[in-house]
Image (cartoon, rainbow, N blue to C red):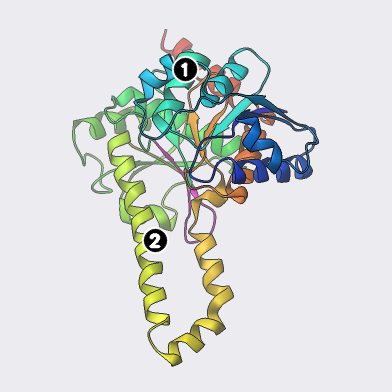
Amino acid sequence: MRLAIDAMGGDNAPKEIVRGAMDAVSEVNNLTITLFGDENKIKPLLTNAKNISVVHTDEVITSDDEPVRAVRRKKNASLVLMAKEVKEGRADACISAGNTGALMSAGLFVIGRIPGIDRPALSPTLPTVDGKGFLMLDVGANVDAKPIHLLQYAIMGSIYSEKVRNIKNPTVGLLNVGTEDGKGNDLSKKAFELLKNAPINFVGNVEARDILSGAADVVVTDGFSGNVALKTIEGTAQTVFTLLKETFMSTAKTKIAAGLLKNDLKGLKNKLDYSEYGGAGLFGLAAPVIKAHGSSNSRAILSAIKQANHMVENDVTNTIKTTVESIESDKE
């Protein structure tokens, strides 16, 4: 597999990006990586250049840049050059931990959409109590959605969960304010009817309080609600661990307890860290595009690379395309 990576995107670039790339080529068979960015910063970090090449550019899209304008004006930015590598067939997939909006814009304007998919979805795999995890679509690519978009999200999520996450006949739930049929706003009600008649394992409405308990393997919603849910999960996890740390550090007795529980607490933290599952896929584009978390370390980058590799190996993009085409032909 040929992978293009924006080495300058994210809070810990390029150090953690380069480290993750080096780890990946030693673990993933037949993998070649092209890093896009400032070679003066990248090459000193590249202690093992096996199957890794560097394309130099000193132009970068920052988190402060307006996404669409930046993609159009900064044509030599590492993120844009990375997307062009995929568009022109020199890479099978790409990864960036940089500006989410810019990555979405580059995906749409440079790589393009799958025919039949109206809007791509930003889709991370989030943790569950049983460690299985679930896929959520959309968490912010499109804050306004139509019922047909949620249907497309459900189809794409089902295919990804089955092909990449190896979940047989994955369950699909619609995020809503209640589990009963007929709940929610106009979008939810219309989407429910579409999902009920779609070629997926639809289990109905699911509530936000139940999604971390494994209410469904795939949870679909509009980007506004999905982003609120995602940020709430992130914030709650951070708050819980802050409170735990304060409690364990409060007295000599609790400090001793913390020492005894150190490994268990670390394991719990890793279980709640969704970067362990890889990045957020931009599903609906003409090639696999992965958005890694902005604060990704080398381990998270490695997970994102493995995720991209699985998407390419299992031909997820073409499977989505053929499934959407078959649904459209059935309507005619």
- How packed is label 1: few (under 14 Cα within 10 Å), some, or many (20 or more)? few
**Disc number placed over residue 93 in the picture, else none:** none
Q: Position of residue 100 (x, y in %)?
A: 42, 33
Image quadrant assignment for residue 173 = top left
Residue 29 image point, x, y percent: 79, 37
Q: Is residue 182 magenta?
A: no
Can you give x and y, in whole percent of width and height, for residue 182 in the image? 22, 39
Q: Closest to the observer: 60 or 121? A: 60
Judged from this view, the residue extending furthest toward the bottom is 253
Q: Nearer the viewer, mark 2 or mark 1?
A: 2
Magenta part of the protein: which range?
A: 126-137
Q: Which residue is mark 1?
A: 327
Which residue matches tag 2? Answer: 237
Q: Residue 151's quadrant in the figure? A: top left
Residue at image position (47%, 20%) is 106
Can residue 38 be seen from the camera position used here? yes
* Figure check: 176 above or below 54: below
Question: Separation of disc 2 and disc 1 at Cα?
Answer: 39 Å
| Quarter of the image with the N terminus in it | top right
Whether the magenta-drawn stretch holds residue 127 is answered as yes
For numbered disc 1, what is the local secondary structure? Answer: helix
